[in-house]
Image (tube, rainbow, N blue to C red):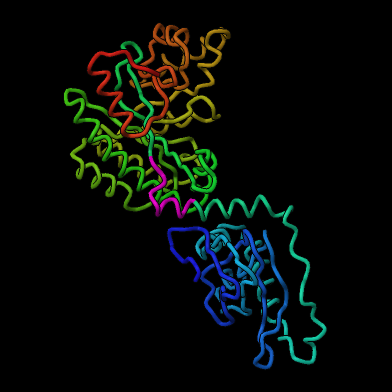
Amino acid sequence: MSNWSSASALKRFQTGETIFSEGDPGDSAYIIESGRVEIAITIDGQPFPLRILTSGDVLGEMAVMDTAPRSASARALEETVCVAISSRQISERVQDADPVVQLLVKTLLHRIRSTPQVTSSTAANIPTGLPSQSVADNDQVLDKMRLESELQAALVNQQLRPHYQPLVNIQTRQILGFEALIRWFSPTRGHVSPGEFTSLAEETSLIIPIGQQTIQQSCRDLAQFQTICPDRCLFVSINVAPRQLAENNFLAELQTVIEQHSLQPSQIKLEITERVFMENPVALETLQCCRQAGFKISLDDFGTGFSSLNYLTRFEVDGFKIDRAFVQDILTNPRTQVLLKSLLAMADGLNMQTVVEGIETLEQLEVLQKSGCDIGQGYLFGKALPFVEVQQLLAQELAHKPVSV
């Protein structure tokens, strides 16, 4: 019996098991991970094999793309493992494609569908095994589709968990808050690089449920951290993408979450990148509404783009994060020191709070303390930690014990 749990990206089929039949709706396509699959059509009431697909091949994609019924059947010839690719994953990419590409895809599908059916008189001339598509040419694309399916399953299975990196007062090194950073340990891939799966999530609508889950969990955890430090108003910094901000109910949901956990809007800092300014006017309007509601807005990776200063003249934010690139050269490059001082002076003049990331040594910290930074972040103060270890870190700080980093 096949494993059709919606919480798993992998689908297993036993020898002889039907994967889909002619006439079925096209709800999924599949990438074969292992095993062999026979594709067949019905001629005069009898199944006629068209081809045999193996590891790395894709099947069932046409019915997903044009929503027509399946034109062939697929059967596992041996124990077979496939990665299911949902109709949403494919249709989303087709809809986002250039209109010319959309037209070409529709034309090609129509041409294939319009090809006359194979008859019994011509059946003997059709080979039972056709060359499979080049795995080498498609590995990168297929692995991206695999990763997306696994990421969707990870979301359902609660495998995506926020870790929290301390944000500290640069002068006293007291913890002021945390940046929530998503971590994913995949049962099949191990630790997946955040840059790899977050960029994929942002390309698709997956970033919306992932973002909702991150906000909910981060606020729940912050409320618990706050009970350890009742005399200190901690905050959490959460990265948000343009797609999230473009959702009509983003602010309403955010307000509902903080009310559930008895938090103040000022305890939530929304971190954005320059892409927000370039991609979606609706997202900017949402950010403005969030700021008016009391939430803090911070510009991430400040100084790495080309238009940051221009954006600051047109859109008010509460602060910005100075990229680690400035910190890495601060001990050896006088020009970096001048630029850093200029950024800090500008922030002071605009009444903005600054966060300097990437602090790893005491020597870097000493220079930054003299420069007038507000908040520090980096391995010197601690890496991103899971919930339980953050609780221990806060308790340790309150007890005035040396912090192990």
Tell me: residue 76, above or below residue 333.
below
Q: Percent from the top left, x then y, of residue 362?
A: 44, 9
Residue 337 left/right relative to 348: right
Between residue 374 and residue 347, name the one nearer to us.
374
| Quadrant into which the C terminus falls | top left
- In the orientation shown, which residue stands out farthest toward the right? 125
Tell me: residue 363, above or below residue 323.
above
Q: Percent from the top left, x then y, of residue 7?
A: 43, 58
In magenta, the rendered stretch is 151-161
Residue 108 left/right relative to 146: right
Can you tell which quarter of the image residue 76 is in?
bottom right
Residue in view at x 69 percent, y 64 percent? 54
Residue in view at x 74 percent, y 90 percent? 119
Q: Percent from the top left, x then y, of residue 109?
A: 66, 73
Can you tell which quarter of the image residue 112 is in?
bottom right
Residue in view at x 80 percent, y 86 percent? 124
Residue 25 left/right relative to 233: right
Residue 159 sits inside the magenta stretch = yes
Tell me: residue 307, above or below residue 192.
above
Between residue 67 and residue 350, name the one nearer to us.
67
